Amino acid sequence: MATKYTARASTSTSNRGRFSSGTNRNSKLRPTHFISLPIGHHVQLQESVKSFADGLLNCKPALPGVDRGIVIAPRRLHLTLGVMTLENSPGRTLADAQALLWKLRTRVMELLDGHSLCIPLTEMNIMNPDRSNADNAHVLWLGPSLNTEDAQRLKSVSEFVNKAFSDAGFIQDRRPLKLHCTILNTSHRKPPRQPFSYSAILTSLFIRGFVRTPLQSHDFRSPVKVEFGTWSVDEIQICKMGSYGPEGEYVSCGCCSLVS
């Protein structure tokens, strides 16, 4: 049985931001903020993910494309519920987004029905690789399988928050929400977008200590089973893109507490 862990997230604040109004001009603006379920404040998770990433980096022979430049700092681990481009237009400011998030709290607590919001990290996979080739991967993630009560509550709350912000015009992306916690991302590489080999990761001796799925004939398009624990979320945050707090975490510009 997975272990559940609890701790409080950072509540550092920032007051700047922009938002897209949905016009052709604003649709080209870069996202400025995102809605986050932070879990990187859990020290045990930091240690576990660091050990995993260090193992990948130290594999012999070296895993193609895997280097320290694409590893996400464990303190920044989170699930994203949507990205936003905030600006100083009426109804489209950071303050408006903060007000909407707080307004959602009553319904979120009803959905939780007295339970904690928890994120089980029980699956691992990659986002769509170039040319559908597992040797051309760009994002490695951990995430929940949806066959537990914790995962179903997580799905319900996440989809509710995402839809509320989409209906209010804050989130422009209408694709189905994919709950995942990024571990490797080549967009951080300089120069960016050189892929890594997921096939090499799955066939390495190192990975056998983490994966619970038989890999002899595994189709990479399906997640593999892992066990990185189940982690509580004590607040939903609006975070600033590219920001760094005192511990390297994303800076929270406002939050909705999930503590009763």
Image (cartoon, grey):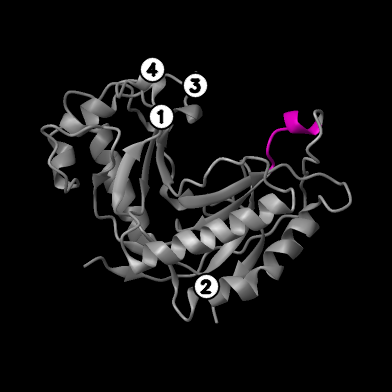
The answer, for residue 252, to whether it is visible in the render is: no
Q: Where residue 172 sits in the image (x, y, percent)?
A: 68, 41
Tell me the residue at 49%/30% (across/down). Answer: 188
Crowdedness of circle 2 by 10 Å Cα count: few (<14), some, many (20+)?
Answer: some
Check residue 148 in the rendering and tell me which mark sits there, or answer none.
none
Question: Is-magenta flag for residue 131?
Answer: no
The amino acid marked with disc number 1 is Asn
- Disc 3 target residue: 192
Q: 93 left or right of 147?
A: right
Q: Is residue 229 above or below residue 114?
A: above
Q: Which residues are magenta?
A: 26-32
Crowdedness of circle 1 by 10 Å Cα count: few (<14), some, many (20+)?
Answer: some
Q: Is label 3 in contact with label 2 (beta carbons under 8 Å)?
A: no
- Disc 1 target residue: 128
Check residue 111 in the rendering and tell me which mark sits there, or answer none.
2
Callout 1 secondary element: loop
Mark 2 or 4 closer to N-term?
2
Query: Which mark lies nearer to you, 4 or 3?
Result: 4
